[in-house]
Amino acid sequence: MPDETLSPIAAIVYRPTDHVEAILVEVARALEARGVRLGGVLQHDIATVIDDPCAMELEDLDSGERFALSQELGSGSEACRLDPASLAHAAMAVRRAVDKGVELVVINKFGAQEVSGAGLRSEMGVAVLAGVPLLTAVGERFLPDWLDFTGGVSTLLKPDTHDVLQWWDALPHDG
């Protein structure tokens, strides 16, 4: 499904059955091994939390710091478990990375929060306006919102590490 027009703004388009978090981690590790300076955040499930099978954390790709993304609301809560303080922490991590001059910003996903105008939507814009390539993941159900957000100017990638690395390799790079 790759777009014919190569753009420094790219989205891995995935289905619920695709393991997009693992693909993003593989891509980040491969690029880090090549010496690419990365910024942004990746999501990791915290499988060791027995009482909370949905516990998540974010990894700041620039500093390596990991911090909780989900908050404990108690067993009876039906509210959103996304911790607003953690989201603000992630936003600052992305902005710091852009200010430091990273070569690529990776943001775990363009999802419901970003569709509603929240989440890390503004930080995606900050990266793009600074001229830093952006890589994210977009669930198929949010693809029309992504295309609207980007004005249709983005490269759509398959949920495949090789496809993503080919996109990166085809972009012009300094040095």
Image (cartoon, helix red, strand yellow):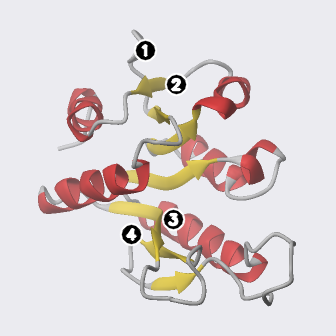
Camera-nearest residue between 153 and 1: 1
Residue lying at 58% horizontally and 65% vertically, measured from the top left = 95
Identify residue type, mark 1.
Answer: Asp
Identify residue type, mark 2.
Answer: Ser
Looking at the figure, which quarter contains the C terminus?
top left
Between the C-alphas of marks 2 and 1, the distance is 8 Å
Do residues under tags 2 and 3 come within 8 Å of each other at their CB atoms?
A: no
Identify residue type, mark 3.
Answer: Asp
Dot 2 or dot 1: first in sequence order is: 1
Tag of residue 61: 4
Between the C-alphas of marks 2 and 3, the distance is 23 Å
Residue bearing mark 2: 154
Sort mark 3 into few (<14), some (14-19) or many (20+) by Cα contacts within 10 Å. few
Left or right of 124? Residue 171 is left
Residue 143: % across, % down: 64, 27
Do residues under tags 2 and 1 come within 8 Å of each other at their CB atoms?
A: yes
Residue lying at 77% horizontally and 42% vertically, measured from the top left = 115
Sort mark 1 into few (<14), some (14-19) or many (20+) by Cα contacts within 10 Å. few
Between the C-alphas of marks 2 and 4, the distance is 22 Å
Callout 4: SS? loop
Determine whether 137 is above or below 41 in the image.
above
Looking at the figure, which quarter contains the N terminus?
top left
Residue bearing mark 3: 99
Tag of residue 3: 1
Sort mark 4 into few (<14), some (14-19) or many (20+) by Cα contacts within 10 Å. many
Dot 3 or dot 4: first in sequence order is: 4
Callout 3: SS? helix
Between the C-alphas of marks 3 and 1, the distance is 29 Å
Foreground tag (3 vs 4):
4
Residue 123: % across, % down: 64, 55
